[in-house]
Image (cartoon, helix red, strand yellow):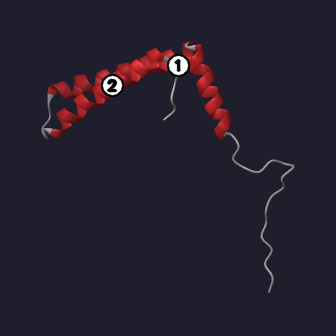
Amino acid sequence: MLLSPCAELKSLSTLLRERYDVRNKILARGYPDPSLLQAELEIIRVQKLITRHRRRCLPCKLNETSAVGADARLGPLAREGSFTPIQTH
């Protein structure tokens, strides 16, 4: 999980954690409950709010872009060459 300097995103993530806690408590009771559907809908609503926020918030966009760039290097650079072990018999 990335840390974000955005206070609004931090509050949305706290809200999402609270909604998951409510849903998990309903599930822990072990029987179907009409409020389970409402809890699931609340989770979806908060996830949509987070997605919308990340699309519009410049600091969140920059943070996401820098995180993607850090993980983008999966293979060796062209100047590094590839390492192929040589088997000798």
Which of pointers 2 and 1 lies earlier in the amino acid sequence? 2
Q: Nearer the viewer, mark 2 or mark 1?
A: 1
To which quarter of the image does residue 62 belong? top right
To which quarter of the image does residue 58 belong? top right
Considering every residue shown, the one lying at the far bottom of the view is 89
Q: Nearer the viewer, residue 48 or 68?
A: 68
At a point 36% along the width and 24% down the height, the residue shown is: 14
For label 1, count other residues whose C-alpha is less than 10 Å away and answer few (under 14), some (14-19) or many (20+).
some
**Looking at numbered disc 1 in the image, what kind of residue is underneath it?**
Arg
43 w.r.t. 69: above or below: above
Secondary structure beneath dot 1 equals: helix
Q: Nearer the viewer, residue 41 or 9?
A: 9
27 w.r.t. 11: above or below: below
- Horizontal side of 33 relative to 56 (left or right) equals left
For disc 1, the marked residue is: 54
To which quarter of the image does residue 30 belong? top left
At a point 73% along the width and 50% down the height, the residue shown is: 75
- Picture quarter with the C terminus: bottom right
The image position of residue 52, as x and y in percent, is: 49, 16
For disc 2, the marked residue is: 43
